[in-house]
Every structure is written in C-alpha cells, then in structure tokens.
Image: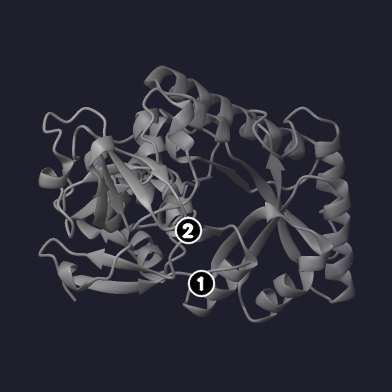
Amino acid sequence: MTLDQIETPAALIDRPRMMLNIERMQAHMNALGVAFRPHVKTSKCVEVARAQRNAGARGITVSTLKEAEQFFAAGFSNILYAVGMVASKLPRALALKQAGCDLKLIADNIESAQAVAEFGRLHSETFEVWIEIDTDGHRSGVKPDEPRLIDIGHALNGNGARLGGVLTHAGSSYELNTPDALAALAEQERAGCVHAAERLRKAGLPCDVVSVGSTPTALAARHLEGVTEVRAGVYVFFDLVMRNIGVCDTRNLALSVLTTVIGHQADKGWAILDAGWMAMSRDRGTAKQAHDYGYGQPCTLDGSPLEGYTLTGANQEHGILANTGHADTDIVKHLPVGTRLLILPNHACATGAQYPAYHARSADDEVEVWDRFYGW
C-alpha cells in the first residue's frame, strides 16, 4: 500500500521517527544502568512492542487485562499490569498465570492486598504484587513514609501473594516545561520510591524491584541509584503535549492523522477536514500549556509543520482548520479540496485509541497495516 491509497482519516506511524525515539530512550536507560520496561498502552500494537523489545526492552507494562491477554498470546510473557487490582479481576489474572504468563499485579491498599492473597491461597497460586508509591501527589499510591506501607507489605508476604517490589509514576511531570524542573522531579520520584523500598526491607520484607517512570522524568533523570527499572510509554510516538514539556521536538512526533480537505468557509478562513474529534480525540492537553495547538498541528505530507494554520475546532467527523497567521489568506487556493495533510495530535495515546489499526509508513513511503488492541 502507498500513502495515496489510504482512506482518510487514518492513523499514520512514521517508522523512522518511531525507531529513533525507541533507540534514544533505550540508549539513555542503558547509560543509566537500569532495565527498561515500556508501557505499551500508548500503541497497543504488537509490531511496535516488538521493536521496543528488539531494541533491548525487558518486559512490558500494560494498562488493561485485555492488553495483557493479547500481548501474552503474541509471545510477551514478562508483563506488569500497572493498574490497581480488585477482586473481580482476579480470575482473569489467574488464567494468565496458569497459562504461563509471568504477570505482576499492583496494589496500594490493604483491602486489595488481602483480596489477592486470599484468592491466591484459594487457588493454590502465588501472585507477585508490587506496591504503588505516591511520590508526587498526582494520582494513586501510598506515600513513602506512610505507616500503612508496611501493613500492605505484610499482607503480601505469605501464602497466595509475594511482595515483588515497589513502583511509582510521576505524572505531575506533564505540568512542567523546563529541564531543571523535570530533573528535580525525576530525582524526587527516584528518591521517594527508593525510600519506600528501604523501609520495606528494614521491616524484614523483600523488595527486589524498584520501578519508576514517566516519559518526561525518564528522559530527564541524571542518575537512578537504587532503581532497578524504568517505565515510559508515550515516548515511542511523542505528541504535542510532550513537545510543549520540552522532551522532544516536532520532528520527533511519530504519530499523525492523515486527513483530506473536503470543503471551505472562505469568509472565515477555514478549510474543512474529514478528521473531527472522532479522528483526533477530544483531548485538548495543550490548552493548559504555553502553546495551545487546538486539536492538532497540521503538516504537509512530508511531516513539515504548516505554519500559520491550526485545527481550531472539531465536530464528530468535521475538523476546522483555520488560518491563524498564514500570509496567504486565500485558503481555498492554498488548500484546495482534495488536499491531504497530516495532523499531529495533542495526546498520542488518546488519538491512537480512535483507530482499529495504524498505517505504518517506511522511509520509502511503503505502508503496512498494523492492528491495534481495543477494550479492557
């Protein structure tokens, strides 16, 4: 397949850019002396995960049990399910374990820890569980100094469950945009998770794994003493939010939406595209950042930004591409009906989730179709 044979809208992966992103992250982890476990929720695609594994990744991180099941069926066995486990999902986790999957679960409360241990004892199985640590107040997890950390550890240290380690995710890194601030948060993330591990060990509990990571902190980390592995996800494609944070450049963005101009509102300076919010997602993550890209940055087919134009609006199937500063105000002449463009997304995970498959474009413009997982 070639580019002109693809029906629009379509999710397009720039394979050379993707491979450079993979190699950059893996090289950084190798230099820091830690294992790298990519979060495959960004792509939910076997071909992408294989490229990450071939570059040196050890294991994968998933956000749904559906992902764990699909990736295990595709030959990935070392899998971390990095969302808090609840009792209702344990039968699916058990099925994966019994099929030979080296599945790790996480918990951040005593109720979940006890439920996992009890279910494991009932079925003569031992689940490996990591405790989620809150190092930045962003989302879930146990604070490193909380007394209940040790209680959860004890609940996981017996028949039915085994305490495998601790993990954290500095999601507040998405709110930063300077190298020094990112480096400081990376150190805060590292130090907090290592401290939690040390407390568990001091209490006589095992804690082999210390896992940290977000794309910004992974790339900003200057040392990772005491850490055994790093997780990151969106780095594989990057997006406009990451560009605003400062961890990549526009030329690093490997995911875009291929779209076609289908009409105009010439008096308003608009071109109408066949890519609305169903194609781009409703994610407006850059609206809170220094540069608001609307629903996405338009580019020519070679990936060069189309300066002076912004995807300012989106209905379900219609995108509104507005002239927000281009010197040529005749948008009908400049972007006639039938023109094909690429739109770089605010959030690669959310935009990818709108599609059942990617169109992966090679350096010589050959295109392969790569399936993508859906559901939970």
Identify whether 188 is placed above or below 338.
above
Disc 1, disc 2: CB below 8 Å?
A: yes
Circle 1 crowding by C-alpha within 10 Å: few under 14, some 14–19, many from 20? many
The quarter of the image holding the C terminus is bottom right
Secondary structure under the numbered disc 2 in the rendered image: loop
Identify whether 84 is placed above or below 87.
above
Give the residue drawn at x 46%, y 30%. Answer: 287
Q: Which residue is mark 1?
A: 71
Identify whether 149 is placed above or below 118.
above
Of 326 and 24, the residue lying toward us: 326
Of 146 and 267, the residue lying toward us: 267
The quarter of the image holding the N terminus is bottom left
Q: Which residue is mark 2?
A: 40
Q: Which mark is residue 131?
A: none
Circle 2 crowding by C-alpha within 10 Å: few under 14, some 14–19, many from 20? many
Which quarter of the figure has residue 324? top left
Q: Position of residue 28 (x, y in %)?
A: 34, 40
Mark 2: amino acid: Val
Secondary structure under the numbered disc 1 in the rendered image: helix
Q: Earlier in the sequence, mark 1 or mark 2?
A: 2
